[in-house]
Image: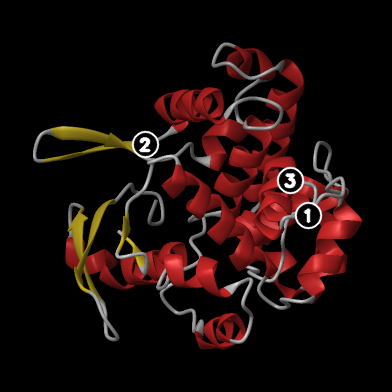
């Protein structure tokens, strides 16, 4: 969404190497009018402004981290276009499979997203916070959410739509501890959700969501740790690789997807 209007984007990487380039195709009624906003959105979502030279210096001098960093070399830390979308993903996918969670999120978009067409093909935005805020738990239950999750999501949508704190903008100015404390005051938001949203919504790439069972299991497997994975253990390990805990979390997730054939790794150096 750019303002109140849906905009279709198609992004293609046209050049690799030391000076990569991307091409962005904009589908909108007046593409020139939204060019700057689109550039900002794409930069945000794809992490294009991130300088990861410090991460690669760290990996170059660390025999454990080096193979993981080199396998996905060039991968940027992606994030959701809005904090509300990050929250929605966290709430919907709690305690269910990724496949089931994606199905519910798709139904949310069908019900509360805005539609546009591009060359005759209909496209729909992610669920708009203002529309979800006016819904009710029964309507969300019909889409596959439990009543409790529906109540949480509606409350989060109302907070995101608040013009005095649009999309939780006040959190940006807070330290990690204060941000987690503030977010955890919201009904339905615990430590895992708060840390996940700080990483995937606010782009704080030093935060490894330590309560993410899948993420910390992948971390312990990667390190060959035999201890039972726990939050304190993750924090202790991440001290070694500060300030890139969240970036390593994303590398572990994507590397796991590559192992299962869901993404292509070209030449064991970068992700396609």
Q: Nearer the viewer, residue 121 or 214?
A: 214
Q: Quadrant of residue 204?
A: bottom right
In the picture shown, does residue 239 fall above or below 60?
above
State the mark number for residue 225: 1
Mark 3: few, some, or many residues within 10 Å (few <14, many ≥20)? Answer: some
| Residue at x 78% of width, y 54% of height | 225
In the picture shown, does residue 113 fall above or below 180?
above
Q: Is residue 72 left or right of residue 118?
A: right
Residue 105 location in percent, x, y? Answer: 50, 30
| Residue at x 80% of width, y 42% of height | 189
Q: Is residue 100 left or right of residue 148?
A: left
User: Which of pointers 2 and 3 lies earlier in the amino acid sequence?
Assistant: 2
State the mark number for residue 103: none
Q: Nearer the viewer, residue 269 or 112?
A: 269
Residue 41 location in percent, x, y? Answer: 40, 64
In the picture shown, does residue 36 fall above or below 202?
below
Q: Secondary structure at mark 1?
A: loop
């Amino acid at each position: 969404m750019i303002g109140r209007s849906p905009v279709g984007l198609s992004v293609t990487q046209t050049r690799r190497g030391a000076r990569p380039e991307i091409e962005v195709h904009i589908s909108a009624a007046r593409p020139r009018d939204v060019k700057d906003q689109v550039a900002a959105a794409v930069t945000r979502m794809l992490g294009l402004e991130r300088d990861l030279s410090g991460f690669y210096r760290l990996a170059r001098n660390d025999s454990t981290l080096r193979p993981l960093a080199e396998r996905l070399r060039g991968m940027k830390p992606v994030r959701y276009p809005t904090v509300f979308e990050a929250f929605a993903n966290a709430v919907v996918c709690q305690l269910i499979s990724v496949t089931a969670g994606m199905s519910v999120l798709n139904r949310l978009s069908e019900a509360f997203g805005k539609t546009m067409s591009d060359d005759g093909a209909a496209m729909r935005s992610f669920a708009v916070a203002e529309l979800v805020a006016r819904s009710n738990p029964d309507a969300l239950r019909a889409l596959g959410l439990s009543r409790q999750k529906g109540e949480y999501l509606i409350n989060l949508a109302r907070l995101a739509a608040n013009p005095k704190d649009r999309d939780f903008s006040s959190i940006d100015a807070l330290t990690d501890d204060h941000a987690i404390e503030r977010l955890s005051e919201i009904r339905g938001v615990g430590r895992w959700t708060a840390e996940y949203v700080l990483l995937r919504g606010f782009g704080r790439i030093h935060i490894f969501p330590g309560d993410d069972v899948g993420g910390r299991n992948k971390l312990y497997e990667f390190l060959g740790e035999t201890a039972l994975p726990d939050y304190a253990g993750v924090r202790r390990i991440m001290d070694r690789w500060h300030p890139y805990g969240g970036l390593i979390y994303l590398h572990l997730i994507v590397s796991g997807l590559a192992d299962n054939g869901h993404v292509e790794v070209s030449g064991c150096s970068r992700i396609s």
